[in-house]
Image (spheres, rainbow, N blue to C red):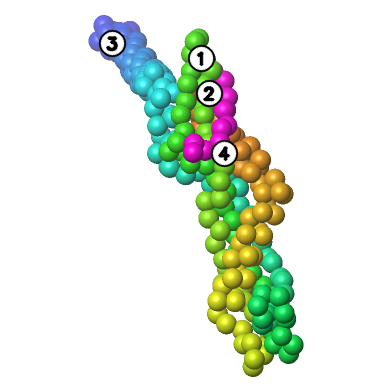
């Protein structure tokens, strides 16, 4: 084999070995870049979680909760069907014959019960691990009639004692009083308290984790 061919073969083999390390080095560099980007992303995410955990505090979370002013914690729909009867009375004791009127009325609506967060306060234990939320007792936030479903079902008017608008208004007020009394006896306030505690506890746990114990102190509204 002549010297020229031998040199060409040697150069080809040398070129092969010089080329392979370049591919390997490129691979290492790409791998390092990907690794650095991945580590940087993980570090950045961890730094964000750390910053958030160290930025949020019970006072900040509490201020965000009370900023909503009112918390509706229980809702109940109702439908009342009742009869109203009226007649003319002389001197407050003598019922005048043939003056009776009556009407059947259906009254429907929705009652919402909640708490006034503007009057809430909080305290932390000596070790800082227990948060006690102080709240006033739940109350009726609204009692809204559904006038599409409410109205007179049947009436027996009387020329000597006609049914007046104020008679219907008085009956509506009685329905409102009766429904509010019935839902109170049905335990809606206890339901509202339980739901309020659960909602507030979830808010604290979502923001601060489960490292805090959340307790509640319920008291009557100040006179």
In this figure, which residue is indicated by the disc labeled 3? 11
The stretch of residues the image draws in magenta is: 209-223
Query: Distance between the Cα atoms at labels 2 and 3?
Result: 82 Å
Residue at x-position 57% and y-position 82%:
164
The first of marks 1 and 2 along the sequence is 1
Sequence-first disc among 4 and 3: 3
- Measure the alpha-carbon separation of dots 1 and 3: 81 Å
Q: Residues within 10 Å of mark 2 (few under 14, many from 20)?
A: some
Q: Position of residue 141 (x, y in %)?
A: 52, 51
- Residue beneath the point at 47% across and 25% down: 122
Residue 132: give its label.
2
For marks 4 and 1, give the one nearer the viewer. 4
Q: Which label's residue is closer to the chain start, 2 or 4?
A: 2
Residue 28 found in image quarter:
top left
**Secondary structure state at the residue bearing disc 4:** loop
Q: Residue furthest bottom?
A: 159
Please name the residue shown 53% across and 23% down the image.
132
Question: Taking the image as drawn, is residue 67 in sight?
Answer: yes
- From mark 2 to mark 4, how far is it between C-alphas? 15 Å
Whether residues under marks 1 and 2 lie with C-beta atoms below 8 angstroms apart, the answer is yes
Residue linked to disc 1: 125
Within 10 angstroms of label 3, few (less than 14), some, or many (20 or more) residues? few
Q: Nearer the viewer, residue 160 or 190?
A: 160
The CA span between labels 4 and 3 is 92 Å
Q: Which residue is mark 4?
A: 137
């Amino acid at each position: 084999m002549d010297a020229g061919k031998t040199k060409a073969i040697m150069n080809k083999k040398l070129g092969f070995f010089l080329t392979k390390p370049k591919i390997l080095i490129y691979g290492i560099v790409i791998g390092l870049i990907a690794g650095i980007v991945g580590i940087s992303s993980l570090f950045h995410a961890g730094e964000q979680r750390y910053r958030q955990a160290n930025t949020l505090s019970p006072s900040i979370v509490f201020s965000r909760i009370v900023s909503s002013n009112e918390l509706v914690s229980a809702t109940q729909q109702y439908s009342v069907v009742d009869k109203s009867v009226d007649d003319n009375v002389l001197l407050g004791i003598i019922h005048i014959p043939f003056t009776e009127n009556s009407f059947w009325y259906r009254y429907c609506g929705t009652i919402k019960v909640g708490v006034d967060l503007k009057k809430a306060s909080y305290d932390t234990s000596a070790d800082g691990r227990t948060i006690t939320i102080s709240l006033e007792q739940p109350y009726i936030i609204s009692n809204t009639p559904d006038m599409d479903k409410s109205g007179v079902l049947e009436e027996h008017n009387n020329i000597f004692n006609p049914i007046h608008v104020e008679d219907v208004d008085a009956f509506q007020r009685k329905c409102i009083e009766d429904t509010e009394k019935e839902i109170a006896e049905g335990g809606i306030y206890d339901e509202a308290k339980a739901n309020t505690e659960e909602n507030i506890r979830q808010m604290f746990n979502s923001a601060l984790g489960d490292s805090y114990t959340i307790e509640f102190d319920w008291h009557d509204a100040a006179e």
